[in-house]
Amino acid sequence: MKSFPMFLRTTDRRIVIAGGGEQAAQKSRLALKTDAEIVLATVELDDELTGLVASGRARQEAGPLTPETFAGSALTFIATGCPGADMALHALAKEAGAVVNVVDRPDLCDATTPSIVDRDPVVVAIGTEGTAPVLARRIKTEVEQMLPPRVGHLAALAGRLRGAVGDRLPQSTRRGFWAWVFNGAPARLHKTGAEEEAAQLVKSAIRNGVIPEGVGEGHIALVGAGPGARDLLTLRAVERLQEADVIYYDRLVDADVLELARRDAERVFVGKEVGDHAWPQERITAVIVAEARKGRRVVRLKSGDPGIFGRATEELSAARAHGIATEIVPGVTAASAAAASTGTSLTERGDTDTLVITTGTCRPGDDAPDWGHHVRSGTTLAVYMGVRNARAVEARLFAAGARPETPVDVIADATKPGERHVTTRLDGLAEALAAAEITGNAMILVRFGKTATRALAAPATLQAVG
């Protein structure tokens, strides 16, 4: 970011607008949304601004204008419509130390005005650092449609009741209580127009000290982070990240995904990878259960889908043994993301009508999966974590009758900036991986299609994406 987004307090402060024409009127309409004193620094006013002064909502300061005119203002707009006058007034305002916006002169602006969605006291500001105001307005329209028209009234009610909540509810339950207000029954009533019923429900809970079911209790959500790109997260996954008190995440979770979590959530990198036992599964299971037993909302953030090779059963079983509420939030799994990145489908009518998901790496001491069992016409075989054992996968498939020319796609780091594709034959899989220097996170898709035209006769090809 080249501009830091923040909200300026305007109570008992001035907003100075230098100018008396249409540009100044536009800025005054923005200023009227605040409780600031509006000062119109100009000799002449158009009819709209004249009416604003007559109503008492603004006052005129006709001059002479000096640095003192702008000193101590919350914000100053320079909007005379004359480039020379704007430059001169900008110099005076800067001499006074004011935060300045000069209309249509981004090079002279300390602050730019965003597109605003106003649900006072809920305010959404959308900015593009002056690069694309039309885009900002389009986003504003989408947000306007997304936010209920009276959501600000619910927020205002919460503001009036915060003191009572602080007095009567234990601190450990307050965040959960407010989550119930804004996501539970009060929010649903309020959205349907039953604002009085919603208010009474909240007040009754506070007055009686009755904590709604589930509030203040520990909770563990196993959340699928998807293959990497954060815009592939589900809405529910984003909600759980926003609600979490603590997040345990793996090495394959992209840093951009963590940006979606609330800022004060604790983040713990558990760093699991094949061959690295700094955070063995038993330790991870123990700590997430321990945190939930403290009444915290825990997110176990896993790449892909937590139900596919994500060790979900072990963590769920431990949580349930202690009576902790659990939830699985599915994510886009690597096989789906990898196929989508190549522009192909995992199944194709008339050619591949069966999808098999398997792993190329098991726990130490366990037998390898019977990959050869899946060599069947019409089958797509998706091999997770198979790079290290690619040669063994090849051998098992050949032993089961797979043809050497069977087509294989390898997609490394699907949906991430460093994504790469390798297209090869089954008899050249290990060599192709070595040549492309793919040693870690990759999906291997082997297609035993029904049609002979799907077999490859060409050597491996490598395509870098992004």
Image: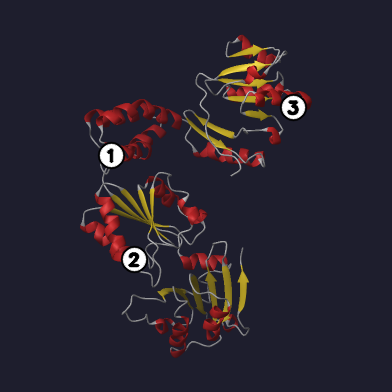
Mark 1 to mark 2: distance in Å? 30 Å
On screen, residue 193 above or below 420: above
Q: Earlier in the sequence, mark 1 or mark 2?
A: 1
The answer to which image quadrant residue 312 occupies is: bottom left
The image shows residue 377 at horizontal and vertical percentages of 48, 82
Q: Which mark is residue 311?
A: 2
Q: Is residue 70 visible?
A: yes
For disc 1, the marked residue is 173
Q: Do callouts 2 and 3 mark residues in contact (Cβ within 8 Å)?
A: no
Residue type, numbered disc 2: Arg
The image shows residue 155 at horizontal and vertical percentages of 41, 31
In this rendering, the label closer to the viewer, 2 or 3: 3
Q: Which mark is residue 87?
A: 3
Residue at 50% across, 21% down = 11
Q: Judging from the image, what secondary structure is the residue with disc 3 in?
A: helix
On screen, residue 320 above or below 132: below
Q: Do callouts 1 and 2 mark residues in contact (Cβ within 8 Å)?
A: no
